[in-house]
Amino acid sequence: QVQLAESGGGLVQAGGSLRLSCAASGRTFSNDRMGWFRQAPDKEREFVAHITWGGGETAYADSVKGRFTISRDTAKNTVYLQMNSLKPEDTAVYYCAARVGGQYAYRGQGTRVTVSS
């Protein structure tokens, strides 16, 4: 069973930056990809970015492309989300999730990001 722990959220002014971390424990080779998702108040959870453990292939939501960067440190089993040029609409709880067997079966507790205008 994969356990995930996010950190790095907080309050930042618009235009600022934050780096989120997600430490994964209990990983197996069946966990091929990690994703970041977010959920704003009164909104559906949405995909932000993902990265594969093996080749480091990435994908981003259009809303964050060019501003956010996902990366991973395979030695530390940790995934990062560098968020630059933050906007008030980026305010949300951010979750990392582990994909196993084609589904994001495990999720962390989330870390809150608040961007003030």
Image (cartoon, rainbow, N blue to C red):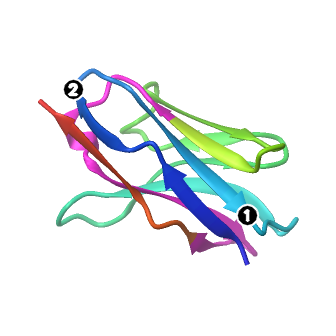
Q: Quadrant of the C terminus?
A: top left
Query: Which residue in the protein does label 1 denote?
Result: 25
In this view of the protein, which residue sits in the foreground, 97 or 49?
A: 97
Q: Quadrant of residue 35?
A: bottom right
Farthest residue, direction left = 117
Residue type (three-letter) at the residue carrying disc 1: Ser
38 or 26: nearer the viewer: 26
- Dominant secondary structure (helix, strand or loop) of the stretch shown in magenta: strand
Q: Which residue is mark 2?
A: 14
Q: Nearer the viewer, residue 27 or 70?
A: 27
Report if the CB atoms under discs 2 and 1 are less than 8 Å apart: no
* Mark 2 surroundings: few (<14), some (14-19) or many (≥20) residues within 10 A: some
Q: Residue at x 68, y 66 (%)?
A: 99
Q: Which mark is residue 64?
A: none
Res. 94 image quadrant: bottom left
Can you give x and y, in whole percent of width and height, for residue 101 in the image? 75, 75
Q: Say which amino acid is labelled 2.
A: Ala
**Which contiguous range is marked in magenta?**
82-106
Label 2 residue SS: loop
Residue 70 among those drawn in magenta: no
Question: Does residue 58 appear to the left or right of 84 in the view shown?
Answer: right
How many numbered marks have been drawn onto this rendered protein structure? 2
Q: Secondary structure at mark 1?
A: strand
Image spot of residue 68 (x, y percent): 47, 32
Residue at 84% x, 43% y is 75
Relative to 11, is 104 on the left or the right? Answer: right
Counting from the top left corner in percent of width and height, residue 82 is at 50, 32
Measuring 33% from the left and 23% from the top, which residue is drawn there? 85
- Residue toward you, 59 or 84: 84
Work out whether 103 lies above or below 89. below
Q: Which image quadrant: the N terminus?
A: bottom right
